[in-house]
Amino acid sequence: MVFEELKEDLMEAEADMRSYIKHSDEYLRLKIFKVIMLHVTGLSKFVLIGASFTFALLFLSLAACLALSEALNNYFIGFIIVGLFYILIGTLLYAFREKLNAPILKKSSKYYFE
């Protein structure tokens, strides 16, 4: 009789364990899917917004080049000034690249460890 009860308890424990493993697996898959989709949608938004800003920046740069060229009466100098401005920005971004990593890591870890 004691062995029968022990056997039933062990069978129930095994069933509970299998159920727990199954549900843990499903939860983990959903969590991974959520994290991947957050990154995919974030990347998609970044690409679309980035492309829009790139085109806007291109046209604004051309307008600035032409305005400077008209003001200085030399097309070459206007384009050189705008080009040097972008080189300065690129150099500053390169110099502070390590400080740019922290906000990106914080945002990514917020989604992953949520």
Image: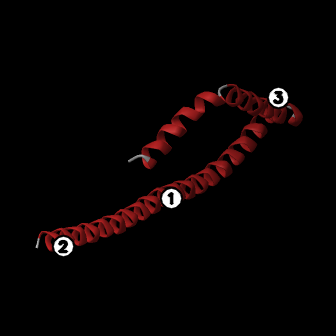
Look at the numbered discs 1 and 3 and tell me whether their residues touch, using CB distance below 8 Å: no
- Residue 13 located left or right of residue 65: left
Q: Earlier in the sequence, mark 1 or mark 3?
A: 1
Q: Which residue is mark 2?
A: 8
Above or below: residue 54 compared with residue 32: above
Q: Residue at x 67, y 49 (%)?
A: 54
Q: Earlier in the sequence, mark 2 or mark 1?
A: 2
Q: Which residue is mark 3?
A: 72
- Residue 105 located left or right of residue 18: right
Quadrant location of the N terminus in the rendered image? bottom left
Q: Which residue is mark 1?
A: 36
Q: Quadrant of residue 28?
A: bottom left
Residue 46 drawn at (x, y percent): 57, 52
Q: Which three-letter amino acid code belongs to the residue tagged 3?
A: Leu
Which mark, by number, is residue 91? Answer: none
Q: Residues within 10 Å of mark 1 (few under 14, many from 20)?
A: some
41 or 57, which lies in front? 41
Q: Earlier in the sequence, mark 2 or mark 3?
A: 2
CA–CA distance in space, label 2 to label 3? 93 Å
Residue 74 drawn at (x, y percent): 88, 32
- Residue 19 located left or right of residue 89: left
Label 1: state its secondary structure: helix
Label 2: state its secondary structure: helix
